[in-house]
């Protein structure tokens, strides 16, 4: 009797799957992610060097689910749920206490004629601009640009509000002749305050350009900041060169400060398989203290479209640090995309 019941349940499950396939035939769901682990000497200005295995020195490890459903008339439903993790320990998030889907968590609508609207937790236009217009991409470990704009330093963090905003609405226009615009607003929830940002991006042929403004007013535990950034890139074929200038104002803290950040980076192709030599220099000029200067250099060897081996070195001198120590770091690591 139990066998017949099990067979009946199995048949019902198969029918349900078959029916679900028929209903969801215009739906596409993708599992994706990236794992980055390296080993080397890591040091921050004013701190002692440590030798260790480290997660995400070139790209923060992450995984996610994203999908689309065709609704007809060129309209799509879109969603994405993306989580950071630390591959060296297996822990979730970028740090203890990080939200599970801290990278992105949104649902929205997209159309070929009017663009897209995404509701939830969205990556900010400033972060996209910062990582798109420097040769090291989203490397918190070795990109002078990312380290200067988003990492706390000996005085304070120039930009506050994280790389993605919760309780947000993000609108992106279609691309017209290489031009696209984005705007995001984060509601005044949780920590009280409202954030907003807008960007314009151009890319056609060898030229790329971006201009973005961001205003953060998120409440008592997150200092206010106001930031604008301009970026340019030009592909000379023998090298792709990037330049960025960022101006950030830190508000609601003592003392209030202004930061000017200038970064120049380059990616030089080696061979025909996507391998590159990377080099970059960044200067952080503070209104309240001494400068911070960062130089990075390395080689990224592309085994395939999904797997690469990198070897990077960095000198990071923050003259506002208590000891004014020059930090020197290096790492060798592997990235795999899936």
Image (cartoon, grey):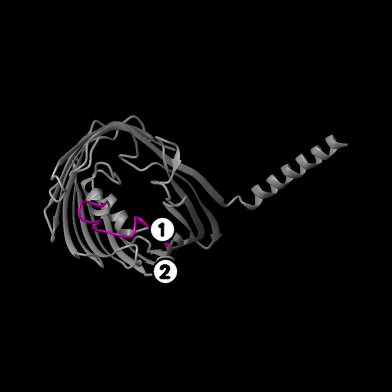
Which image quadrant: the N terminus?
top right
Across and down, in percent, residue 334 comes to 34, 32
Across and down, in percent, residue 104 comes to 43, 53
Q: Nearer the viewer, residue 337 or 220?
A: 220
Task: Give, as a single range, the part of the protein colored magenta.
Answer: 152-166
Q: Are marks 1 and 2 in contact (CB under 8 Å)?
A: no
Q: Residues within 10 Å of mark 1 (few under 14, many from 20)?
A: many
Q: Seen in the image, is 60 located left or right of residue 319?
A: right
Q: Which residue has dot 1 on it?
A: 122
Residue occupying the point 48% across, 53% down? 80
Determine whether the residue tagged by mark 2 lies in a helix, strand or loop.
loop
Q: Seen in the image, is 188 located left or right of residue 27?
A: left
Q: Which residue has dot 2 on it?
A: 187
- In primary-sequence order, the first of circles 1 and 2 is 1
Q: Does 262 appear above or below 17?
A: below
Across and down, in percent, residue 332 comes to 28, 30
**Mark count:** 2
Q: Residue 115, located in which quarter of the rendered image? A: bottom left
Q: Residues within 10 Å of mark 2 (few under 14, many from 20)?
A: some
User: Is 198 covered by the magenta stretch?
Assistant: no
Q: Does 332 appear above or below 229?
A: above
Work out whether residue 311 can be spotted: no
Q: Residue 122, located in which quarter of the rendered image? A: bottom left
Residue occupying the point 23% across, 38% down? 43
* Magenta residues, dominant SS class: loop
Residue occupying the point 28% across, 55% down? 129
CA distance for labels 1 and 2: 12 Å
Determine whether the residue tagged by mark 1 lies in a helix, strand or loop.
strand
Across and down, in percent, residue 112 comes to 44, 61
Q: Nearer the viewer, residue 182 or 316?
A: 316
Q: Does 289 appear above or below 280?
A: below
């Amino acid at each position: 009797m139990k066998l017949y019941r099990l067979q009946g349940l199995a048949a019902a499950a198969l029918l349900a799957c078959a029916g679900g396939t028929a209903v969801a035939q215009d739906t596409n769901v993708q599992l994706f992610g990236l794992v980055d682990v390296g080993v080397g000497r890591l040091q921050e200005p004013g701190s002692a060097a440590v030798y260790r295995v480290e997660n995400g020195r070139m790209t923060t490890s992450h995984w996610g689910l994203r999908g689309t459903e065709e609704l007809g008339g060129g309209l799509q439903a879109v969603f994405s749920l993306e989580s950071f993790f630390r591959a060296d320990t297996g822990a979730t998030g970028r740090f203890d206490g990080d939200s599970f889907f801290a990278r992105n968590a949104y649902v929205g609508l997209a159309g070929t004629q009017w663009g897209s609207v995404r509701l939830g937790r969205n990556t900010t236009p400033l972060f996209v601009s910062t990582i798109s217009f420097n040769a090291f991409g989203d490397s918190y470990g070795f990109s002078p640009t990312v380290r200067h704009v988003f990492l706390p330093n000996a005085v304070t963090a120039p930009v506050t509000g994280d790389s993605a905003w919760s309780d947000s609405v993000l609108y992106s226009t279609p691309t017209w002749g290489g031009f696209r615009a984005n705007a995001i607003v984060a509601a005044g929830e949780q920590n009280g305050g409202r954030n907003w940002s807008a960007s314009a991006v151009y890319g056609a042929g060898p030229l790329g350009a971006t201009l973005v403004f961001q205003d953060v007013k998120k409440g008592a535990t997150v200092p206010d900041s106001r930031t604008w950034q301009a970026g340019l890139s030009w592909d000379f074929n023998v090298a792709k060169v990037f330049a960025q200038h960022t101006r950030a104002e830190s508000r609601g803290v003592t003392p209030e400060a202004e930061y000017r950040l200038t970064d120049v980076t380059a990616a030089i192709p080696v061979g025909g398989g996507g391998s590159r030599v990377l080099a970059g220099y960044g200067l952080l000029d503070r209104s309240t203290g001494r400068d911070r200067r960062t130089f990075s250099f390395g080689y990224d060897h592309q085994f395939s479209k999904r797997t690469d081996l990198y070897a990077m070195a960095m000198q990071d001198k923050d003259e506002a640090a208590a000891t004014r120590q020059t930090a020197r770091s290096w790492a060798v690591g592997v990235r795999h995309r899936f």
